């Protein structure tokens, strides 16, 4: 059976072990070739080839429900469930998603990309099944990294208590993105390296030398495996005391052993945990060697694994500034929730191991842990992706802002990202600016980012800085870090027909739009607000009054966002100006290169120029109308202008 002929997992069930393993090798090849050209999650998927084959041969998807935690490791599942022909479009605009998505397949049950949710959702489905007196299996597949997230424990606590029939597969490769951390991780390591697992692994390796097998030999082989797997049922205090039956550890690249363990789990009436030991990056030497680097990322050279280098990124500037600040100030400490490389803290971690904390995939704990550090005199900086901070919203409000503690939250990936709706950093402006006392900043370039970080750590209360993914602007960097005046923006360009106010890096689009408009005889002011809380009321009301037409631009949701803040300010100050807001409307934004969405939503120089043109035309025509006495005296118009760019 070739992958191209496979239309669904039901076809797998008649295949021999040798045929399935051959299919597995083809899957590895397809994933490697595709991810090398599209980017994506390589190592996690290479590690679950045999596990996914076992799941789809023992269970009957979609009748049985397989839920992938995070779901970045679901490429094999996608290939086995009829998506081979479109797989080359992985993560491209309009193509196959990088995560599971029910819109894409009946074999996918959730469109998610945040960690530690699968056991909660699985126990919910299992309880619903029981209430409806239906019969199917619910299986949550969760990595040891995702098992560091608190919600996974809340769910296990519930499962053990509810005694609901469901299977949790713990895919233990000892890695989160970086090497996994924490007490539970150490506990799993002790099981993996314990004598009983080592013996079983050895026995099975010997047995497997006999593959491919036929006839009587094959039966004997399976019998021996069953014997072997029986020894796997070692007592496991942690899971068993919670009320779950533990099976494992199972060698995760041994297909018959996996199948046997899954069958055993299926035969149990109550909740079970199957502990599977896998190798992240399995089968591709450079991915096995550097599973961290090949966890997820951009395209690379398939022969060497070399990724393209490039200009400096905002994450690197964050990391470099942290190092610089830590050298000057012994109170500086850095926190990450399992993303040391992603947020740019890897180098800092080497230089300041004592003042660096990887808390695991535990954003909630990370924020409250920071509050403790701040309370006791430190200046904690939590480097976190915008989308993952959503997890810790109450902790930011209740444990940091309400306590008025000097915690800096540095939000990377604020704005559009390739990964799609699960990972877009588009809510942060809205959710941060709603919090009293929160100082909210967005830099126009990397030089401003370093000064904002310095401003944050020297501020007496909570602060947040949001900046986008990827390449910085490429401006020269000041040697000396300086605190910025709180709540003060900068007027970058004078102009009296319209004011363009871009939040963060949208300032760059506004500057380019102003150049274009100047050629057309429209004089545009450009404002860098720097702070989206507090706003620079003096500057914004002045440009509003001077031009009577303001375009706000933000790579964030319009609902309650920066443009809304400007409208609130103008309403309060009685500024008679038309405001047109350019940003993301009230819908989820899919996967694919951010530039496609920037174009769609008008977040480009051309889009901003067009919004300004329309606004200026409207202001001029109303003025003309009034002059000609055709219009009745218009009431002061403060608010949105109906337009395509502001829906
Ligand atoms: C709430 C949250 N924080 C951070 C991440 C980023 N992230 C994606 S996968 C991953 C590591 C997951 O490790 P594990 O569950 O062991 O899966 P593996 O990739 O090792 O198979 C992390 C930290 C996330 N998806 N969700």
Image (spheres, rainbow, N blue to C red):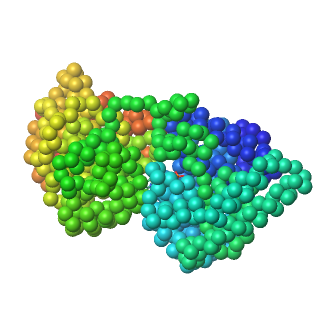
Q: Which residue is situated farthest in the right direction here?
A: 216
Residue 510, image x, y percentages: 24, 33
Would residue 641 be visible to someone looking at this image?
no
**Image height of 564 relative to 396, above or below:** above
Left or right of residue 404: residue 208: right
Residue 265, image x, y percentages: 69, 67
- Residue for point 73% across, 58% down: 203
Left or right of residue 73: residue 56: right
Q: Which residue is situated farthest in the top direction here?
A: 519
- Say which of 453 and 401 sits in front: 453
- Say which of 408 and 222 sits in front: 222
Q: Where does the C terminus fall, quadrant-wise? A: top left
Tally of marks: 0
- Residue for point 44% across, 36% down: 593
Would residue 434 be visible to someone looking at this image?
yes
- Residue for point 14% across, 39% down: 480
**Image height of 353 relative to 194, above or below:** above
- Residue for point 63% across, 46% down: 76
**Image height of 644 relative to 165, above or below:** above
- Say which of 440 and 95 sits in front: 440
Query: Which image quadrant for residue 451?
Result: top left
Q: Where does the N terminus fall, quadrant-wise? A: top right
Residue 170, image x, y percentages: 58, 61
């Amino acid at each position: 059976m070739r992958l191209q002929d496979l239309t669904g997992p039901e076809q797998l069930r008649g295949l021999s072990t040798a045929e399935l393993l051959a299919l597995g090798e083809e899957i590895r090849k397809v994933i490697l070739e595709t991810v090398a050209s599209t980017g994506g999650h390589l190592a996690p998927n290479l590690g679950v080839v045999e596990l996914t084959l076992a799941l789809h041969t023992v269970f009957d998807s979609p009748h049985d429900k397989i839920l992938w935690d995070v779901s970045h490791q679901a490429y094999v599942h996608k290939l086995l469930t009829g998506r081979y022909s479109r797989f080359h479009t992985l993560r491209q605009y309009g193509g196959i998603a990088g995560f599971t998505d029910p819109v894409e397949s009946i074999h996918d049950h959730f469109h998610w990309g945040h960690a530690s949710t699968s056991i909660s959702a699985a126990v919910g489905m299992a309880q619903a099944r029981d209430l409806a007196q239906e019969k199917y299996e619910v299986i949550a597949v969760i990595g040891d990294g995702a098992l560091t997230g608190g919600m996974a424990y809340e769910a296990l606590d519930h499962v053990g208590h509810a005694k609901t029939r469901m299977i949790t597969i713990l895919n233990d490769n000892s890695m989160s993105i970086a090497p996994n951390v924490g007490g539970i991780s150490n506990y799993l390591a002790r099981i993996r390296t314990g004598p009983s697992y080592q013996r079983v692994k050895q026995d099975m390796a010997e047995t497997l030398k006999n593959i491919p097998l036929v006839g009587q030999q094959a039966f004997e082989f399976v019998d021996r495996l069953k014997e072997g797997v029986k020894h796997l049922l070692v007592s496991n205090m942690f899971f068993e005391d919670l009320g779950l039956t533990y099976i494992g550890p199972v060698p995760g690249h041994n297909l018959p052993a996996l199948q046997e363990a899954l069958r055993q789990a299926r035969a149990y009436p109550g909740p079970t945990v199957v502990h599977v030991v896998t190798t992240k990056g399995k089968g591709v030497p450079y991915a096995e060697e550097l599973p961290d680097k090949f966890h997820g990322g951009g395209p690379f050279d398939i022969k060497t694994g070399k990724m393209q280098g490039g200009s400096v990124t905002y994450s690197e500037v964050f990391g470099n500034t942290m190092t610089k600040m830590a050298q000057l100030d012994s109170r500086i400490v850095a926190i990450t929730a399992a993303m040391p490389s992603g947020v740019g803290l890897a180098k800092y971690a080497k230089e300041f191991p004592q003042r660096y904390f990887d808390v695991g995939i535990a954003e909630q704990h990370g924020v409250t842990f920071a509050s403790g550090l701040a309370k006791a005199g430190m200046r904690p900086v939590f480097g976190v992706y915008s989308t993952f901070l959503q997890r810790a919203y109450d902790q930011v409000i209740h444990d940091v802002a309400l306590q008025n503690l000097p915690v800096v939250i540095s939000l990377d990936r604020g704005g559009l990202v390739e990964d799609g709706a699960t990972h877009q950093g588009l809510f942060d402006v809205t959710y941060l600016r709603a919090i009293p006392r929160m100082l909210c900043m967005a830099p126009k370039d990397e030089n401003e980012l370093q000064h904002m970080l310095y401003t944050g750590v020297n501020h007496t209360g909570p602060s947040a800085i949001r900046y986008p993914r990827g390449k910085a602007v490429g401006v020269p960097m000041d040697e000396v870090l300086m605190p910025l005046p709180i709540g003060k923006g900068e007027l970058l360009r004078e102009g009296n027909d319209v004011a363009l106010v871009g939040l963060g890096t949208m300032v760059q689009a506004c500057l380019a739009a102003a150049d274009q408009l100047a050629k057309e005889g429209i004089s545009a002011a450009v404002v860098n607000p720097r702070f989206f809380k507090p706003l620079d009321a003096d500057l914004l009301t002045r440009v509003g009054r001077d031009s009577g037409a303001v375009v706000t631009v933000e790579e964030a949701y319009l609902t309650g966002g920066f443009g809304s803040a400007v409208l609130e300010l103008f309403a309060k100050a009685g500024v008679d100006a038309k405001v047109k807001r350019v940003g993301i409307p009230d819908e989820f934004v899919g996967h694919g290169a951010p530039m496609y969405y920037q174009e769609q939503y008008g977040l480009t120089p051309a889009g901003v120029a067009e919004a300004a043109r329309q606004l200026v035309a409207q202001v001029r025509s109303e003025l003309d109308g009034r002059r000609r006495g055709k219009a009745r005296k218009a009431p002061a118009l403060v608010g949105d202008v109906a337009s395509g760019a502001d829906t």
